[in-house]
Each structure stands twice: as structure tokens, then as C-alpha cells.
Image (spheres, rainbow, N blue to C red):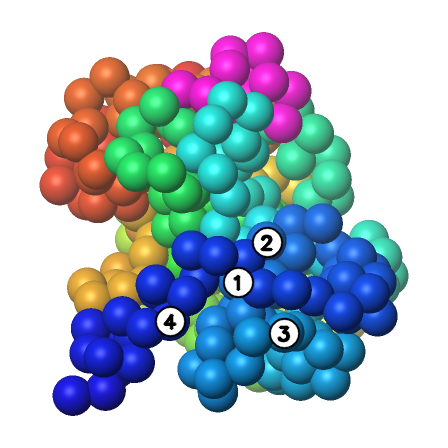
Amino acid sequence: MNGPKGPVGRQIEERAVCKLAWEPEAEAALSRAPFFVRPLARRKVEERVLARGGDRVTLADVREGEARFKAVAGGKSDTQLERVMPQPNRPGAQMLAIEVCHCELSGCPNALIKPQDWKQPIEDWAKANDISERLRQRVEGERILFHHKLRIAIAGCPNGCSRPQIADIGLVGFVEPRVSPENCIACRACEAACPDRAIRVASRNASSGCHPQAASLEGVLTSPAIEGTLNGAVEGGTHEGPCFDRAACQGCTACRDVCPPEAITLSAPAARLLMGGKLGRHPHLAETVGTAADPAEAVRAIAEAVDRFLAEARPAERFAEHWLRTRGAAPKGGAQ
């Protein structure tokens, strides 16, 4: 049967032992490809020439290979391609793949943290602690593939454009809305604007789940599940105000942005720390394990989790798999 293991496949393998001749124009065209692509491109082009029974690589063969590669690459930049391309398993290989959203470049109005300000300390920690080399030494075989790498994603806001939910480790910018009871007019604008349905305006005496003593908390919402700040002196004598479901609240600014009397304020921006995200045969969305007020707190928590992985993981086990198996102990490095 023809195929990789059949007569055709064996013939290609046998003939590939002797390097095919390349026309000068073909070599010149290949030299213009990104350096990290050239070995794979050369091999793929030669395989196709051999499969057709050829013994010489022409410019047309390279052009055909280039077209096929661009179709597969899907418009990815050279930097993106370099991160996912196979590379030799040898010292110096980069084993961290850090993805950040492009909020700073695009001027995104939703950004709550600057991803680059959080990325750089992570890179500094990784370099100072030789993390890439320690991760590389766990890889068996001659090639490093993308799934061998530790994937960290940083998003400037809860929209999560860098896909932190499917990364080994994620950081997501957020804020916590707070209410000034004396300013709230119970207009329900915040309730209508919340994209997560995490707010409702309810009566103090209704069975709404609002914290019964919320009016005395001065806008700091601290009840375990549904936290409320009720206005007991709104116009007309009503006792209504917004109740926040903190389990549903993603921490954006929508409620603050539409509040007419500016009764809703925001906490200082911070980052949620996520771990355990992955795709593949058994996909799993990353889980929130804590928060970090600044990059230093995030680095301490990440360092603890990665050190634990390097010390305890089974051979060939990936970070997310290890974290899910052990359900990672709550980070001690400052994240709460």
C-alpha cells in the first residue's frame, strides 16, 4: 500500500539520504524565508519533489511550497510562527510562550492593566532562574514542539483577547466596582448595562440575597456570594440599590461608565491569576486561583507553581496536566 510506511514512503526515505540538487534560483528563494522555517521548508519541498519522481529542486517547486506554507500559516507573523515551529532540543531553546493582548498597540479602551508591564517581570524571572533550560531538560526526543512549552497569556481586561482561559497560566486585568449609598438613585442603569448579569437593583426587605447590613459597609462589598450596597435614603423614600453577584462579575467598567450620579467607583486595577487551561483531547478552561495587585505578586505566585511543577511532575507531564492532577495548592506568593 502506498503511504508513509508503504513502497512510496520507503522510496522517498531512501532517496532522501542523498540530498537533492537545488537550482541556484531555488536556493536563493529559500534563503529569503525566515531562518527558523528553512530546515522544515527544505525537507517538505524535497519530499514533494521525490514523491513526483524528480531529482532536482527548481524555483517552481519552492514557489509551490511557499504557497502551501502561507495557506497553512494563516497570516501569522514571523514572531508567531517562530514560537510554534519545531526547534532542536538543545541548550538555548526558548521554552516560554508568553502571549499578550494588543490593547496597548491598538489603544483598546477596555484595557485595565498594561500587559507589557506584567510580561517583562515574568521574562526577567524566567531568565534569572534559568526556567527555559530547566523546562527543556524535561523534553524527551530531538525536537521541541509547541505543546512542550509553558504557555502564559496576559489579557488587559476580562474580554481575554489573548485567550488566558486555555493557557497553562493566565493573567486577566480586572477592577472591583464599589457603590456610594448616599449617591445612588436606584435608576437601574447599571443593571441594564452589565454584560455578565451580575447586578440587580433590589429592595432592602425583598428576598434578593442582598447583604442585610450592606448600607453600613461604606461601599466595600464583602459578603461571601452576593454582595450588596443598599441606598436607604434615595428620593421618594425607596430602599433600593445595586446588588453585585461577585461570582458572576468579571470586573469591567460597564456599570461605572453608565452611572448618572457617579455613585459607582472602581478599585485599583489588579489581575486575576488563572491556571490549568488547555485544549487537546481533554480540554479544560483555566481556573481562577487568586489575584495579584501588581506584577511582583504575580511573579511570586507563578514561580511557586512552576517550581512545584519542575520538582514533582511526572516524566513528559505538561504543566496544565500536573496542575489539574494535583489541583495545585493555593499559591502562597502573594496572590489571594
- Mark 3, residue position: 56
CA distance for labels 2 and 1: 6 Å
Residue at x 72%, y 49% (from the top left corner): 35
CA distance for labels 1 and 4: 11 Å
Q: Amino acid at mark 3?
A: Arg
Q: Amino acid at mark 1?
A: Arg
Which region shows up in magenta? Answer: 123-134
Judged left or right of residue 193, residue 170 is left
* SS category of the residue bearing label 1: helix
Task: Tell whether label 1 touches label 2 (CB within 8 Å).
Answer: yes
- Mark 1, residue position: 43
Mark nearest the camera among 1 and 3 is 3
Indicate the quadrant containing the C terminus: top left, top right, bottom left or bottom right: top left
Residue at x 34%, y 18% (from the top left corner): 307
Residue at x 58%, y 43% (from the top left corner): 98
Indicate the quadrant containing the N terminus: top left, top right, bottom left or bottom right: bottom left
Q: Amino acid at mark 2?
A: Pro
CA distance for labels 3 and 2: 17 Å
Task: Tell whether label 3 touches label 4 (CB within 8 Å).
Answer: no
- Mark 2, residue position: 39
| On screen, residue 104 above or below 94 | below
Q: Position of residue 67 (x, y in %)?
A: 68, 83
N-terminal-most mark, 3 or 2: 2
> Farthest residue toward the top?
128
N-terminal-most mark, 1 or 3: 1
Mark nearest the camera among 1 and 4 is 4
N-terminal-most mark, 4 or 2: 4
- Mark 4, residue position: 12
| On screen, residue 30 above or below 175 | below
Q: Amino acid at mark 4?
A: Ile
Q: Which of the 4 image quadrants contains residue 27?
A: bottom right
Q: Position of residue 11 (x, y in %)?
A: 32, 73
